Amino acid sequence: MDTRPRVLVTGIGGIGGTVAGWLTQHHPDVLEDVVSLTRNTSVVDAVAEHGYRLRGVGEQVDAPGVVTSSLPADLPPRDFILLATQPPDVEAAARRLLPHLAPNGAFVVFQNGLCEERIAAIAGGERVFGGVVGFGASHPEPGVFERTSQGGITLGRIDGRTDDPRLHTLATLLEAVAPVTIAEDLAGVRWSKLAINSAISTLGTIGGNTLGALMKYRFVRRLALEIMTETVRVAEAEGVQLQKISGTLDLEWLALSPAEQLEVLGSPSLFSKHTVLLAVGTRYRRLRSSMLSAIERGRPPSVDFLNGEIVSRGEKHGIPTPVNAAALEAVHAISRGEVPPAHETIRALARDVGIRLLLPS
């Protein structure tokens, strides 16, 4: 690979815009070019006029950059194509951009869910890296990209190899955005993030509020614990060894034991798990579900790639996933306009799955 790698970022929302903006801000002497691609012409116009306006968590930077809604025919092949679209769009994006990927280049999958397998079926496993993003980001207006919480990026290959020099080149580039770790067990990291997102993003969509506001309610925390517990059980059936999120959040410990699932207020261990979720809610209190934002823009939600993945793989292994199934249907009902994203909607979900005694009066 050339020592001056060429990068394309597609999907210029909260994550994609934050990544592209900080790459252009910090690597003008390393990158030959960083091109960003979006269908949103208002973002193209805003970045052309003001640059990437990077905000949040102590950041206030305006970084120059190139954003386009169509790629020139003579665009040089890209060494890395960073896929930051919503999950429902990622396979179409990979197929469309495959001709622009250099022979030794790699797609980098930033989506939540288990999208690496889908992209490997299009491009081949050797040309796919996973990028698990640990920070939150939003796109409150065209050209403004706000980091809502701190966190790093974990990179890896599907086969677990860490000696690929392209991984280390990419890690060096992305250090401009956030601290980077290269993982031997990408699947373990990805499934742990899946468990978190299937609870946080989905419940944030149903409740229509920030994580900090929702996690104050015991019944919402219990819904989150039930969703994560089902995910952990399915991951175990898949032969996945879950990895700690940010080195501290242990999903296997958070998963409810059969005895805890029968408790309402209960044991010290259950109290400790609620305390952990309260702390998560406090740390990421400003986090708003990107899936909810997608629905508000009239786009399909990514819930099939989160809770839907858990439900379908649970069926394959004969593992019940009733809370994930109910959450999946609730998001689809919101997307169809049948119910609003609201506190009453998440209360109704809790009642539907039998979490009644924890509901506020």
Image: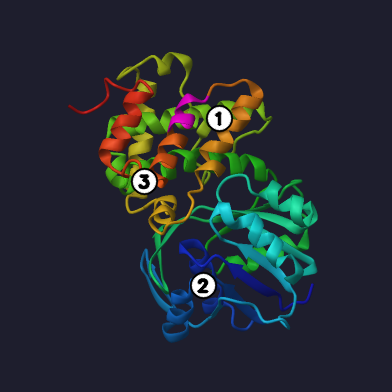
Where in the figure is residue 182, as x and y percent of width and height? 66, 53
Name the image quarter holding the C terminus. Answer: top left
Q: Residue at x 51, y 37 (%)?
A: 307
Distance from disc 2 to disc 1, alpha carbons, whole Å, reads: 34 Å
- Residue extent of the magenta highlight: 321-326
Tell me if label 3 and label 1 are in contact, CB under 8 Å: no
Q: Residue at x 59, y 78 (%)?
A: 27
Q: Amino acid at mark 2?
A: Trp
Where in the figure is residue 62, as x and y percent of width and height? 42, 80
Distance from disc 3 to disc 2, alpha carbons, whole Å, reads: 37 Å
Indicate the secondary structure of the residue bearing disc 2.
helix
Q: Is residue 105 visible?
A: yes
Q: Which mark is residue 337?
A: 3
Q: Which mark is residue 101?
A: none
218 to the left or right of 280? left
Q: Nearer the viewer, residue 99 or 259?
A: 99
Name the image quarter holding the N terminus. Answer: bottom right
Tell me if label 2 and label 1 are in contact, CB under 8 Å: no
Where in the figure is residue 140, as x and y percent of width and height? 36, 65
Indicate the secondary structure of the residue bearing disc 1.
helix
Q: Which residue is mark 1?
A: 232
Q: Is residue 186 above or below residue 139?
A: above
> Tag 1: Cα neighbours inside 10 Å, few (<14), some, or many (≥20)?
many
Q: First in sequence, mark 2 or 1: give its number.
A: 2
Q: Which mark is residue 22?
A: 2
Q: Residue at x 32, y 44 (%)?
A: 341
Tell me if label 3 and label 2 are in contact, CB under 8 Å: no
Q: First in sequence, mark 3 or 1: give its number.
A: 1
Q: Is residue 252 visible?
A: no
Q: Amino acid at mark 1?
A: Val
